[in-house]
């Protein structure tokens, strides 16, 4: 669709909020495709744009590849735009959708106070519309982070709540791909049933093969199952179609685990350095990063990373890792655990003086 001029008429006639606009230029056997997302409620403002330069050899494959990238990226962009717009409105007028959007905006920041506020928003959304699937799915997702950050006051109850919310979401809307893949992630990472999780991810991708979240979450599930080649393939699909995803700090972190389990410790360390800088308050990424440092014998850097991790999760230990990990293969579990030991992580808990050092650091 090109040449947009009268956004008011378009909104009124078609009920549209956004329009995808694009141009195609061809020079010999090369194509340049420019795609833009226009926000009609903001005077045709360009809120996202991407240029694709490709050889015009296989047009059908080219069309599929570009469609996948555009759909994945504008999905995340529209979610952010809607969330920011909702956050600017008075809270007293908030609908269930508004509460959910406000929560989505806060979840990824990993600021404890804002994160807990996100949980309250999701609870409010569910109370307002008990049969609305999406808030249930996001609340399940929220519980995954609550447990992963060691912020749950009652971990067992939070695990059960995550499972209940995920199951309720897919009962309410069995065709919601995002709800299905979140449910798959809960089965895999929280309930430690990755084979069941893998089946839900496949179902999600059958409904929406352009959902970056499903590619990323299914990638880490494959890593738990020991198929690191398939895990890497899926993670690369996510990264290709949505390189600047809303939850890049989580999804890029899966590459650390994949490299670790492939025994490519140097790549795990390089990725760990980059990803932990994206969100230095997200504790989960420090763990495979630290294990890779342990295997490489990089004691000085491991000490610094261990202190950063313990400042976020004071109770982390090898024993706690082994009790919580959904990694299936014993050889992979032991590889990870041994890396943590080599990096100086205590078997059952840290000494009081190291906890003090971690908080000072």
Image (tube, rainbow, N blue to C red):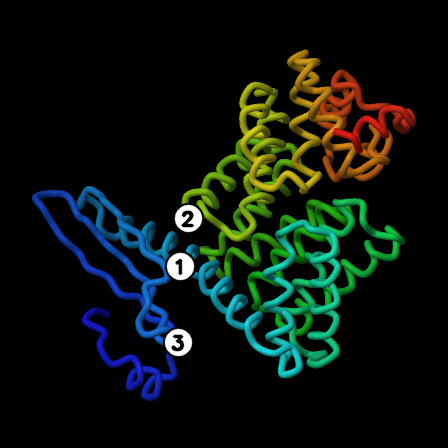
Which of the 4 quarters of the picture holds residue 4? Answer: bottom left
Up-down relation of residue 204 to residue 279 (above or below): below
The x, y position of residue 292, in whole percent, is: 65, 22
Label 2 close to label 1 by CB (< 8 Å): yes
Residue placed furthest toward the left: 28
Identify residue for label 2. Answer: 241
Q: Nearer the viewer, mark 1 or mark 3?
A: 3
User: Sequence order check: which comes first, mark 1 or mark 3?
Assistant: 3
What number is the disc on residue 71?
A: 1
Q: Disc 3 on helix, strand or loop? A: loop
Q: Quadrant of residue 49?
A: bottom left
Q: Is residue 139 left or right of residue 29?
A: right
The quarter of the image holding the N terminus is bottom left
**x then y, percent, for residue 245:** 49, 50
Per the image, label 1 sits on a secondary structure element best described as helix
Badge nearest the viewer, 3 or 2 = 3
Q: What crowding class fits label 1: few (fewer than 14 Cα within 10 Å), some (14-19), or many (20 or more)?
A: some
Closer to the chain start, of discs 3 and 2, is: 3
Q: Secondary structure at mark 2?
A: helix
Report the quarter where the C terminus lies.
top right
Q: Position of residue 339 (x, y in %)?
A: 73, 20
Q: CA distance from mark 1 to mark 3?
A: 16 Å
Q: Nearer the viewer, residue 175 or 95?
A: 95
User: In the image shown, does 128 or 322 lie closer to the viewer?
Assistant: 128
Which residue appears at 59% of the width and 38% of the height? 254
Mark 3 touching mark 2, by CB under 8 A?
no
Q: CA distance from mark 3 to mark 2?
A: 23 Å
Identify the residue position indicated by label 3 in the image: 17
């Amino acid at each position: 669709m090109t040449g947009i001029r009268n956004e008011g008429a378009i909104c009124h006639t078609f009920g549209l909020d956004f329009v995808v606009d694009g141009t195609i230029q061809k020079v010999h056997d090369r194509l340049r495709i420019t795609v833009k997302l226009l926000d009609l409620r903001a005077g045709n403002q360009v809120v996202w744009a991407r240029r694709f330069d490709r050889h015009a050899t296989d047009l059908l494959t080219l069309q599929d590849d570009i469609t996948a990238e555009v759909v994945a990226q504008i999905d995340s962009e529209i979610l952010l735009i809607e969330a920011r717009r909702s956050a600017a409105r008075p809270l007293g007028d908030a609908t269930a959708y508004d509460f959910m959007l406000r929560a989505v905006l806060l979840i990824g920041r990993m600021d404890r106070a804002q994160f807990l506020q996100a949980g309250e928003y999701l609870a409010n959304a569910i109370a307002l519309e008990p049969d609305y699937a999406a808030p249930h799915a996001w609340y399940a997702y929220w519980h995954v982070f609550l447990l992963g950050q060691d912020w749950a006051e009652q971990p067992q109850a939070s695990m059960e709540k995550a499972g209940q919310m995920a199951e309720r979401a897919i009962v309410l809307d069995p065709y919601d791909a995002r709800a299905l893949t979140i449910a798959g992630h809960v089965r895999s990472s929280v309930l430690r049933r990755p084979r069941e999780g893998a089946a839900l991810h496949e179902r999600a991708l059958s409904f929406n093969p352009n959902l970056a979240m499903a590619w990323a979450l299914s990638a880490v599930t494959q890593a738990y199952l020991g198929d690191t080649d398939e895990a890497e393939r899926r993670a690369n699909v996510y990264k290709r179609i949505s390189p600047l995803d809303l939850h890049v700090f989580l999804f890029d972190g899966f590459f650390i685990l994949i490299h670790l389990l492939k025994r490519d410790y140097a790549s795990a360390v390089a990725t760990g350095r980059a990803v932990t800088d994206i969100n230095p308050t997200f504790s989960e990424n420090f763990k495979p990063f630290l294990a890779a440092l342990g295997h490489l014998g990089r004691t000085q850097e491991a000490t610094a990373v261990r202190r950063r991790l313990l400042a976020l999760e004071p109770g982390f230990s090898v024993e706690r890792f082994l009790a919580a990990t959904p990694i299936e293969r014993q050889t992979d579990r032991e590889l990870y655990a041994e890396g943590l030991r080599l990096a100086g992580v205590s078997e059952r808990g840290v000494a009081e003086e190291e906890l003090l050092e971690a908080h000072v650091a």
